[in-house]
Image (spheres, helix red, strand yellow):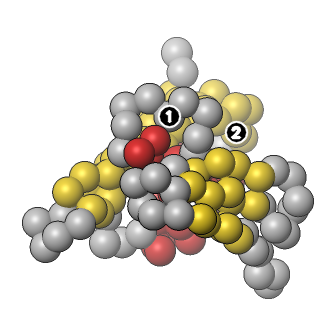
Amino acid sequence: MPTRTARTGWTGTLQEGGGKVELTSSKLATFEVSFPRRAADEAGGFTSPEELIAAAHSACFAMALSNEVAQAGGTPQALDVQADVSLGPDPAGGFKLTGIKLTVRGEVDGLSAEKFAAAAQAAKAGCPVSKALTGVDITLDAALEE
């Protein structure tokens, strides 16, 4: 299996400095990062490690869920996955990821709501990004579109 690479160049201090994150493997984009923007409610055109983790988790979970739905005998028509990654203070000092909420709404043929929920739980457990983030509380809200 391949290895994917990203790199960050940073200059300055934590509070006054900043950096650029480059998606090196794909060469698709470079994003600005800044600690003050990371800790602010409004991102203001900057990304953060938490947003990048949310992107990775939502994509990984969507792939895993499409597989689980098919394994359960259903056909995924559309999956809308959102990952909300929260940053907060760490009682041991500094900061930590305080939680991840996965929300998925699916249009699926051939599965009941219960089987879809079971497939979503299996995808949450089997997704490689979920596995990498086992030290973070991950919650799941999964439902079929009506």
| 26 horizontally vs 100: left or right | right
| x, y percent for residue 141 | 38, 38
- Residue at 62%, 58% (x, y): give it: 19
Which residue is at 29% across, 63% downward? 96
Residue type highlighted by circle 1: Ala
Q: Are marks 1 and 2 in contact (CB under 8 Å)?
A: no
Mark before the other along the chain sequence, 1 or 2: 1
- Residue occupying the point 56% across, 71% down: 128
- Label 2 sits on residue: 76
Label 1, label 2: how far apart the Cα atoms are: 33 Å
Residue at (32, 59) in percent of width and height: 97
Residue 51: x, y in percent? 53, 47
Residue 8: quarter of image: bottom right
In percent of width and height, residue 66 lies at 67, 50
Q: Position of residue 79 (x, y in %)?
A: 64, 35
At mark 1, the secondary structure is: loop
Outermost residue, left side: 91
Q: Is residue 134 left or right of residue 7?
A: left
Does 142 appear above or below 145?
below
Left or right: 70 with respect to 17? Answer: right
Q: The N terminus lies in which quarter of the figure?
A: bottom right
Direction from residue 25 to residue 71 in the image, left or right: left
Disc 2 element: strand
Q: Which mark is residue 143?
A: none
Q: Amino acid at mark 2?
A: Pro
| Residue beneath disc 1 | 43
